[in-house]
Amino acid sequence: GRFRFEVFKYQPGTVDSLGERFPDGLLEEIDLSLISKNQKHWDRTLRNYHFSLTLPNIPTLQNKIILQVTFTNPSGKRYEDLLILERQK
């Protein structure tokens, strides 16, 4: 399957708080159907996938952002989740 990682502006007062995507907000798209990519991200000890992502430049006044992760399995079914990330003070 494929993982897609995107960063959006935090928009308070909306159902999911999802604002517009940052211009360079597509962090990465990883196709785990490729054996080399699958093995690179698989952690045998913890038995899960591990991804290191570099966030885009976030404006100083933007205290919260949203990381959206979308997984599409080989048959095309999509799963999405959002995580609100808050700037450390």
Image: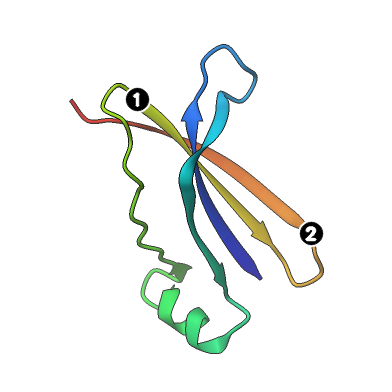
- Which residue is situated farthest in the front direction here? 23
Q: Going from the N terminus, do you reach mark 2 or mark 1 first?
A: 1
User: Alpha-carbon distance for marks 2 and 1?
Assistant: 33 Å
Where 36 falls versus 70 (above or below)?
below
Label 2 amino acid? Lys
- Which residue is situated farthest in the left direction here? 89
Give the numbered dot on residue 62: 1
Q: Secondary structure at mark 2?
A: loop
Q: Nearer the viewer, mark 2 or mark 1?
A: 1
Q: Are marks 2 and 1 in contact (CB under 8 Å)?
A: no
Residue on which the image places disc 2? 77
Q: Which residue is drawn at the image coordinates 26% and 27% (left, top)? A: 60
Where 6 falls versus 2 (above or below)?
above
Query: Is 70 left, or right, of 53 in this rendering?
Result: right
Residue 51 vs residue 5, the one in the foreground = 5
Q: Which residue is drawn at the image coordinates 64% and 58% (left, top)? A: 71
